[in-house]
Amino acid sequence: MIKLSYNVKNYRKDLQDLIEDGDVVIELGCHTGGTTQLIADNCSVIAVDNSPEAVDEMAKLDVEFISGDVRLHDVLAEVFKKVQKCDVLAIDLGGGYHPDTVFKVFYIWSSTFKPKHTAIRNRGLLEFFNSAKSSGEDYFSEEGYLESYHDSGIPPQIKEFELWTPSLK
């Protein structure tokens, strides 16, 4: 199941509803751990964020923390060395910013780790979803990733990220 929200309280509730005891959770965009603190008690969390504020705050929590940019292939590979599958993928990259980037991050990470569930917090994606009308084509995924990409393995680095963000070069 893929859950999409914008309000951080709804996002956190979605995660709490999706996570079961003993699950492996990959949290992208943990910042200083506000959401992490709510979910870490009953699961194993690998949290990733590139903000300088995250380093000291995340060190206080009993989770695996990786300081890095989730758009970079090397960061994906670092997490993949630790775990090849997750039960829940949590994505909160600023809530209202850049739905295209959030979707690409979702695609890369969910295609790699094949989660049972994904929770995404992003206003642009939610607005698009709520505004779109279907042409009648029936594509639907029961899992937390797009099932049409189930055998693709680790996707290659998306070169478009270099075009948008000079700091990724």
Image (cartoon, rainbow, N blue to C red):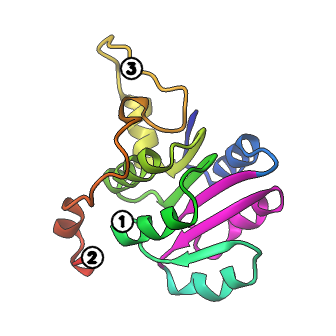
> In the rendered view, would you say 100 is above or below 40?
above
Identify the residue at image location x=45%, y=77%. 68
Percent position (x, y) of residue 113?
Answer: 50, 49
Identify the residue at image location x=71%, y=72%. 63
Image quarter in which the N terminus is found: top right
The residue nearer to you, when weighing 10 against 141, is: 141
> In the rendered view, would you say 65 is above or below 135?
below
What residue is shown with label 1? 71
- Crowd tier of the residue under label 2, counting other residues whose Cα lies within 10 Å: few below 14, some 14–19, many 20 or above: few
Read off the magenta span: 23-50
Q: Are marks 1 and 2 in contact (CB under 8 Å)?
A: yes
Which image quadrant for residue 118? top right
Query: Which of the labelled discs sits on residue 168, or is there none?
Result: 2
> In the rendered view, would you say 10 is above or below 26?
above
| Amino acid on which the number 3 mark rests in the picture | Tyr
| Amino acid on which the number 2 mark rests in the picture | Leu
Quick check: 162 left or right of 92? left
The residue positioned farthest toward the left in the image shown: 163
Query: Which of the labelled discs sits on residue 49, or is there none?
Result: none
Magenta span contains residue 39: yes
Disc 3 is placed on an element classified as loop
Quick check: 101 left or right of 42? left
- Crowd tier of the residue under label 3, counting other residues whose Cα lies within 10 Å: few below 14, some 14–19, many 20 or above: few
